[in-house]
Amino acid sequence: MSRRNARVPHRETRVSTGAGVRRATWGALRARRPAVTRLVGWSVVEALPALLSGALVARAVDAGFLAGRLNVGLGWLGLLAGAVLIGAVATGRTYRSLGAVVEPFRDDLAGRVVRAALRDATRVGGRADTASAARLTHQVELVRDTFAGLLMVTRGFLFAAGAALLGLVALDPVMAALVAAPLVVGLAVFLAALPAMAGQQRRYVRAGEELGRAAATALSGHRDVRACGATERVVADVGRRVADQAAAERTLARMSAVRSLSLGLGGWLPLAVLLLAAPWLVDRGLTAGAVLGALIYVSTGLQPALHALVQGLGGGGLRYVVTLDRILRTCPDDEPDPPPAAPSAAPSDQPADGPPSARDASPAAPRDASPAAARIHRLTFRYGAAARPVLADVTLTLPPGEHLAVVGASGAGKSTLAALLSGLLVPQAGTVLLGGVPVATAPPAALARLRVLVPQEAYVFTGSLADNLRYLRPEADDDTVAAAVEVLGARTLVARLGGLGGTVTPDAISAGERQLLAAVRAYLSPAPLVILDEATCHLDPAAEATVEDAFARRPGTLVVIAHRISSAVRARRVLVVDGERPVTGTHEELLGLSATYRELVGHWTDHPTPAPQH
Amino acid sequence: MPTGDGMFRRVVRDAGGWTAALAAITLTGALAELLLPAVLGVAVDAALTGGSRWWPAAVCALVAVLVATDTLADLASGYGAARATARLRERLLRHLFALDVRAARRHPVGDLVGRLVGQAADAGQAGTTVVLGAIALLPPLGSVVALTLIEPALGVTLLAGLVLLAGLMRAFVTDASAATAGYQRALNSIAGRLLESLAGARTIAAAGTHRREAQRVLAALPELGANGRRGWELLARASARTAAVAPLLQLGVVAVGGYALTAGWLTPGQLVSAVRYAAIGAGLGAVLAGLNRLVRSRSGAARVAEVLAYPVPTDGDRRLPAGRGALRLTAVSVYADDGRPVLDGVDLTVPAGVTVAVVGPSGAGKSTLAAVAGRLHDPDSGEVCLDGVPLPRLRPDELRRAVGYAFDRPALVGATVHDAIGLALPRDEAAPPADGSSAAPAVRRAAEAAAVADVVDRLPAGFRTPLADTPLSGGEAQRLGLARAFAGADRLLILDDATSSLDTVTEHRIARAVTGRPGERTRLVVTHRAATAAAADLVAWLDGGRLRALAPHRRLWADPAYRAVFRTDGAPR
């Protein structure tokens, strides 16, 4: 478990929840200013029927129907119908402009999630979080939909309610004031409760997720839980999440009651106020048509607009805030680019850049024109402050052209050593130099030119075979690639996949075939040091020997984290990892020196073909 | 056993008084909503003609009722659903863990989690959906009736408009699904590439190419955007249509009402009523769409009921007599779902303190034998006794203290590594020590016996490292699983291929704990390895569900058929 679990706390804790969301939202709107402007423009046109409805109906009733002139009344209504059609066209246009605002925002977020996931997975001591795929397909999509909804209801309310109030003012300013007062009160109550609602919504979402996670863990252990007689304990544990979730749901119900109350105040009270004031307004000379018009403004303009706003903000709007906040937190912005890589960090080019540290200049390691391929000096590594070290005070020098095999029981720290040697883990103490360059300070691109690490889980991506094989050396010509394919015994595989131009998908080939492709890729790499970290464990022994022999003949230095004892026998030197201090020697020397090695050899030869791991 | 609809009714009852309260509240609200336009009309006429001043007050009263009922209905439906959902989940959870392993295995874990988390929540809405589904229909239907009562032509106008509206809605649903499919495809391709890259994280980290990878993963973004914009186009067309039709529908009512006004059939106040009734009636489509929730809730209840219908095994109340774990299987048979025998009349007697290796080719019934020996499930016929007591007669806690299991692929359960190892221990022994030392003595002993204490000590927080932060290789998980079993097996330890992923050195190191010393607890060890069989006192050789032999390994080794078991099965797994 050691090698994959180093988890450095990296999630920044932001003080304010809303600030990030607000900044991201405004940023998204500002970046798409032309589209937002179009959206606003069409929204104005869309509000035309809302502006005219009450006034035209009032005119139709007063001057038409009540005056006995049906045609005049129908004429005014026809005018309104025309406004409705224009408004409908504008509605269509607003959705189109909306797409132009929302889609780029989604692109930004998707890019952010992907970059953060890759950065997290490849960071020193980082690890791959497959939940990021779900973040991409669910959370980003949820934000996209709710962002669109939020924009629509907010601008819909502003324009529809604004138009209705304007129309009311045109009918009778006093009446407009009477209607506006309760509306503002209701809105204020709602907006005041909104931050609390967001908090409750977040709690609710989290309670649901925790329940899901606890249930999944418990149920995937159903057999084990029953076998251990721990049913009561586990049921009680999950039951607690059930109760938490129910409590969150009740809180949410209280919140939605507040929402309904503010909706009632803002939506229904204007109607009541209007009615109560109607006799007095009529005494002041208000016509029947004007009363009817005012009621239409309230019931078809204000009420639905407020309803949409409250439902939209209280539902999708809260989900938007909560989900976007989560994305922003788990996927922090791109870090600034690492300091530019030295034009060439190849060892021989820059002897002057070598570390001038006194510690390193031990008498046993005289500086010469060709520094050691790799030097590990007094290296100590542990996975946590309280943890026992995996390696303690390890010193090891690999001369150029060395072929070293690393052996040991599983979990002994072989892969940790490989990761430290490659600079993928940072030791608590000690230094690692590759060709005289300290890995701790070398940028990733420079490191990639110094060494190539081939892990057990071979990386093959969907794409052309050529792209996969040239991954570490894009400029390699076809002949060079073909030669490498030949040397590593991958010709049959490459032919089957349709040659270099063929498309490969990782799921369509076996684990061993993926490892073979990764080996060809590493062979092509310009790096002088090759580290095979159980990179051939899915190959049969003969194919494994072909690959290892090819790498041994390749100019440069080879380190093999061994999966079979045959790798140790082939190597010039063997490192036995067992406990904190490894032992080195040749195969024959170690048979005399190390009991662990004897044990390993004994068991491995007992089982010449151990079970390949799946 | 509750059927789907029985379950549904039961959930409605589970919400208790909340459902009844919700019904009373929403009914009151619906009546107020229906009365309001009529009263409003009278009030408008009264205001215009100087009639009674009480009508506006009546409107205010109705509005107050509406505001109150809306608010209370939210509260009642939320509380009722929360209560019904929690009860249903608790019942389901209890039932799931009371089921034996064979019954639970019928569903994948994701499916069961879906039922517990998702469908139980849907079902929990039963009360709300029934009440709202029934009562929410009242105002729109009532308003059509009211309009017709005011003036038949108005009712006809509204109905015609509603039919038109429904047609337009349908058209959009079919259009949109095509655009959505293209969008999903692009999205899945991005997610798929991201997963590929994450699987190769170590290679990418070493090559320093994560920026290049991000570009590769996001290559399909333009395609995604194009599909997304097509979706907005469709939505634009659909919403333009509905934006035109719904207001025109109301305008039609006003026009017809205007004609009636001119003709003197209507008062201005009645026209106000008509306009409002038309608005309520236009909400019928939304109410009908809300019936989807009823359907979903019912199907959720049916899915939960299906699992609750599986019978749970019954337990006894007997205690074990003194003994060291003598195991006896008598005529034990187990049949697969298709009726094929997995174990066929197996008789096996294991004296107390003996180690028995169970070997045989794949499909011979080894794991099933291990499962019935410790009552992970009961055999379909025959009897299993531990120290003379049939397993179903035993108290469950007595049985679980006496028998421990370790598996090929253990599922580790608990918040920390310490919890996971201590799962089979009594609660007080399983708790991590309060004095800050790394592990409880029983837990550390078990970890050492399984040669995993070293590995755990190197974790960031040792034994207290959260399991979620501890991705385990197969061999490491197996060793934790072994430690867990060592901690809690007083009389019988059953290892079901539990060392298959260990490298041979490690396996050798824990061999003593696995095969044991004479006189300790009884051990039943399912294995593929000849060395493990050789170290056992006896080998139970299974073939085709039958016990072919029970003898020491060295005696069986002479039989080529026995040796073949290890050749074919032992090497490539």
Image (tube, coloured by chain):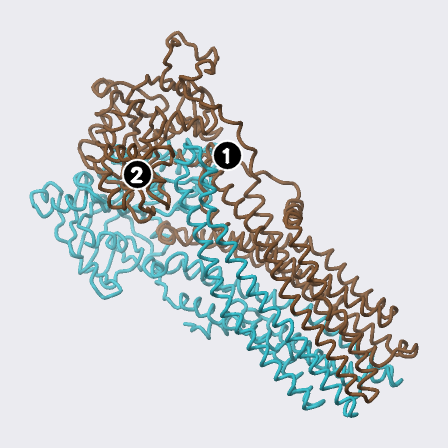
In the picture provided, is A196 more to the left or to the right than B288? Answer: right
Residue B548 to residue B435: above or below? below
Mark nearer the N terminus (2 vs 1): 1
User: Distance from label 2 to label 1 (Cα)?
Assistant: 32 Å
- The answer to whether residue B555 shows anywhere in this view is yes
In the picture provided, is A566 more to the left or to the right than B309? Answer: left
Q: Residue at x 41, y 54 (%)?
A: A219
Residue B496 to residue B94: above or below? above
User: Which chain has been coloured brown in this picture?
Assistant: A
Secondary structure of the residue carrying tag 1 is: loop
Please give the chain letter of the residue carrying mark 2: A
In the picture provided, is A278 more to the left or to the right than B417? Answer: right
Amino acid on which the number 1 mark rests in the picture = Val
Of residue B283 and residue B546, the one placed in the foreground of this image is: B283
Packing grade of label 1 (10 A; few <14, some 14-19, many >=20) is some
- Circle 2 residue: A517
User: Which chain has been coloured cyan in this picture?
Assistant: B
- Circle 1 residue: A8
